Amino acid sequence: MTTANNLKTVLLLGLLSALLILGGQAVGGKSGLYLGFTMAVVMNFVSYFFSEKIALSMYHAQRVSPTEHPRIWARVGPMTERLCQRMGLPMPKLWVIPEQSPNAFATGRNPRHSSVAFTAGLLEAMNDQELEGVVAHELAHIKHRDILTSSVAATIGAAITQLAYVAMFFGGRRDDDEEGGNPLAGLLLLILGPLAASLIQMAISRTREYAADAAAAKYCGSPWGLMNALRKLEAWSQRVPLEASPATAHMFIIKPLSGQALARLFSTHPATEERIARLRALV
């Protein structure tokens, strides 16, 4: 699975970089092409080395340790350490997000450089068995090395979205008399750029949720904790939606957006009912 996810990461970087380069050309002609290429090189570097910090800072995550948020650490820290021992993982950094909508995600570039973040609402809503299921699910993403793929997708997907906004305002400008940005191309980039990024993210990330669920059930010794957690998360996300960036929605354990028809159509998550059914089949 590690090799497959490494290949997925390379593919994702290549496809999203191509969108940046072609999008730059559509917006600004030859100079836009050079700008898109430069953005692709910079974003590849940034997404590999700094995507973890970017994702955490986007949600104002605060470190959890024996000295920082010690009450949260007392509940989550030992639980995470036990699961890491079972799964053969180094201990990730733990974070709390000051949001009432219950959710969680893992990020980083490899198991030695990884983080798990929980919202305050999740810690309040879950009992210990359910919380263990959520922790195990996020650790499974780290073990399977899904986190690099999802972190890269979040960083470059956000860049493509920004390029689309640039296209809306500057798509009609030309860089010289012979070559330049095409207004129609700029409009198409505005529509298709974020859509293409979302489709790539969706294609790569959907099946990983099933694999992480199954691994969580295995290392917890039972699927019931995660099953109950998913039921709670689905119900709470409808009542208290987390208005996350579409570029990072795929990182969370459950879809954080408020659930409009378009968001459901291009969801990066399988249906919660199907995830629960697959977990029940493991009993």
Image: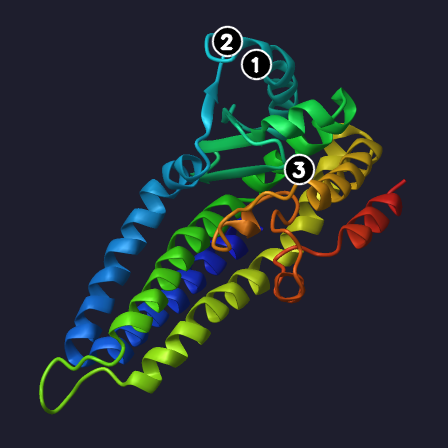
Residue at (66, 18) in percent of width and height:
79
**Disc 1: which residue:** 73
Residue 7 location, x and y as percent? 47, 59
Q: Which residue is mark 2?
A: 66
266, above or below 64, in the image: below
Q: Is residue 181 above or below residue 199?
A: below
Left or right relative to 54: residue 134: right
Earlier sequence position, callout 1 versus callout 3: 1
Quadrant position of the C terminus in the picture: top right
Q: Name the image quarter holding residue 33.
A: bottom left
Q: Are marks 2 and 3 in contact (CB under 8 Å)?
A: no
Q: Look at the numbered disc 1 and give the secondary structure of its residue.
A: helix
Q: Earlier in the sequence, mark 2 or mark 1?
A: 2
* In-front residue for pair 199/139: 199
Count of residue discs: 3
Q: Nearer the viewer, residue 182 or 68?
A: 182
Q: Nearer the viewer, mark 1 or mark 3?
A: 1
Kindly identify the amino acid type of the residue bearing the numbered disc 3.
Answer: His
Are the residues at dot 2 and dot 1 in contact (C-beta closer than 8 Å)?
yes
Spatial CA span between label 1 and label 3 = 18 Å
Q: Quadrant of residue 86?
A: top right
Q: Residue at x 37, y 40 (%)?
A: 54
| Residue 38 in which image quadrant | bottom left
Q: Position of residue 113 (x, y in %)?
A: 42, 33
As displayed, is residue 273 above or below residue 114?
below
